[in-house]
Structures are given as structure tokens and as C-alpha cells.
Amino acid sequence: MRDSFEQHLSGKYASLSAKLKEAADFVVANPVDVATRSLRTISKDAKLSPATFSRLSTALGYNSYEDLKDVMRVAIEHRANTFSHRVEVLQQRHDDGDQGFLTQHINDCARNVQQLGASLEPEVLEACIERLHSARRVLVLGALGSTGTAEYFTYMANFIADNWSMASRMGASLASGLVGMSDADVLIVMTKPPFARSAINAAREAHEAQAFVIVITDTHTCPALPFASAALITASDSQHFFSSYASTLVLCEIMIGMLAGRAGAQAQARIAEVEHRNRRLNEVRDD
């Protein structure tokens, strides 16, 4: 990860000339403008020459002003995608009297589900279901915000199959779950920004073991995708501070439904037995 502008500046600010300090102060005070506007415009607003900003870039160790600008752009994009910034935006909307979050979020989730239907490649999904159906073992990993969705996915699957398990559940070692994986097995990884290192590392380990790796994420920039045998992208856009999992849940239900459709009489018998034991253990009420 490249160093921030502030990191570059902190160790060299004292040695800068008065003009370069003035330019540096302007960059710190106006990061969005620097990241998005032309050097000519920045120079005019700062009342400094373009050459001053170029000299500042060189003094701080950048190859050019464009390199400095690129660092500022990445920093702005990162901040715009942090949970803390997004909740700040939500709170500002509330303070401004905006009461439309309910309708907006429902519409966002509906649009994400519609986009899922339009973007899912049937042949990719079918290949995933076929591998899940024939797998010796299926391991599901969903760290951080994806943990609950992964657990729900595994819970549904356990009604129709006995070879699914959830990685790192209840303190279990992730490594122990990955031991012995081969081309007969499937690893399902769920991860969304900020990406969990454990998910990326597990995808790599399973890929190297020649297991079939299904990565469920919401962006084509997910660092686990290079290790995926199949990628399933689910939109998560919303005004919420947290990634929406509505379309991911729908995808999980689709996959389990398709899997149940080809599971045959054995799955029917298993579901009946699960329901019978639930009643015997008083885990559910019949009324």
C-alpha cells in the first residue's frame, strides 16, 4: 500500500521553503479539489504557480504532480468507502431533515436483486450447483460481516446434505477445516469490502489444493477472485453505511433451491428426519 500524502509530508515539511509549505498546506486543506481538479485550477485557487506544486511533488519524493494527485485520489476513494464516513453521511441527511431512508433502502435492495437476476451467468451458476451436488465435502467461509450470511447458507444446506460445514465456527481453527481438501471438495468464500484476510488466504489455500473455489462478492476487484474457480457477483449498493446483503441472501436461497431440486429421495428423507428430530427435541412448536 502506497504511503499517504501526510506520511510523505510529515518528515519533510520543516525543510520546505515558504512557498512549498504554502502549497503543502493547500493540499492538506483541499484534498478533494486536488484529487479531482486540474493543476491549472488548483494553482489559480491557491494563488501559486503550477511549477510550485510540481516542485512540491518532487520535494516529497513523487515522480510528478500527477503521482501526488493519484495518491490523493486513492485516499479520497478509500475514505468515501469507509463505514465511518458513510454513517456520517447518513447522520447528516437525518440532521438535514431527510426522512426518505426507508423508501430509498427498499428501492436499493430491490434494484440489487433485479441486477442479480440480470447479471448471473446461468452456465456459471449451473457449474457451481453441479460441483456442490457431487462434492465430497463443502466448506463455507464468511468472515466479518459475511459470517451471518454464511451461517444461514450452511444451515439451509444441512437440511438436504450432511457434507456441509462452516469454517472457523465457534472458535474452530480455519486451518483444520482446510486440511485434506482436494479436487473432490468445494470451498465457498463470501467476502465484501473491507475484505477479510482469512477469506483471501483460505481461497488461496483451497485453490492450491485443487479444490473448486466459489467466491461470492460484490466487486470485480475482490482480491480472492484470482483463486476462484467460479465467481458470483452480487450487487450491494445502498445508502446504508453497511454493505447490503439482500441480493447475497437471495443468491444463497437460489443455490440451495437448485441443489434441493436435484438432491433426490435421499434429501427428502433427510429433511423428514431433521423435522422429526426437531419435534422430538422440542426445538420447534407444531401449533
Image (cartoon, rainbow, N blue to C red):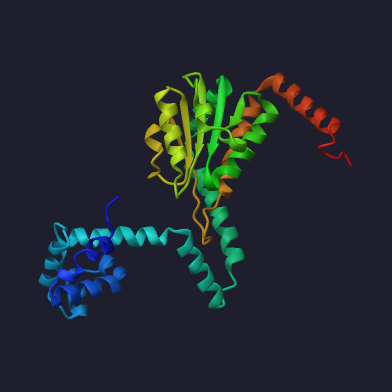
Query: Residue 176 at what x, y percent from top left?
Result: 53, 27
Camera-side residue: 24 or 241? 24
Residue 54 shown left or right of residue 175 in the figure: left
In the rendered image, the vertical position of residue 185 relative to residue 233, given as above or below: above
**Total count of labels:** 0
Q: In which quarter of the image is residue 52?
A: bottom left
In the rendered image, the vertical position of residue 107 relative to residue 31, given as above or below: above
Q: Quadrant of residue 7?
A: bottom left
Q: Which residue is drawn at 53% across and 46% down?
A: 144
In the rendered image, the vertical position of residue 98 relative to residue 268, given as above or below: below
Q: Quadrant of residue 61?
A: bottom left
Camera-side residue: 68 or 39? 68
Query: Residue 196 at what x, y percent from top left?
Result: 46, 44
The outermost residue toward the right is: 287
Camera-side residue: 139 or 37? 139
Instruction: Please indicate, yes or no, whether residue 66 appears anywhere in the rendered image.
Output: yes
* Quarter in which the C terminus is drawn: top right
Instruction: Please indicate, yes or no, whether residue 250 appears anywhere in the rendered image.
Output: no
Q: Residue at x 49, y 68 (%)?
A: 88
Q: Residue at x 31, y 57 (%)?
A: 74
Query: Residue 205 at what x, y percent from top left?
Result: 42, 29
Query: Residue 164 at what x, y percent from top left?
Result: 61, 27
The outermost residue toward the bottom is: 47
In the rendered image, the vertical position of residue 191 relative to residue 52, given as above or below: above
Q: Residue at x 14, y 60 (%)?
A: 64
Residue 150 shown left or right of residue 9 in the figure: right
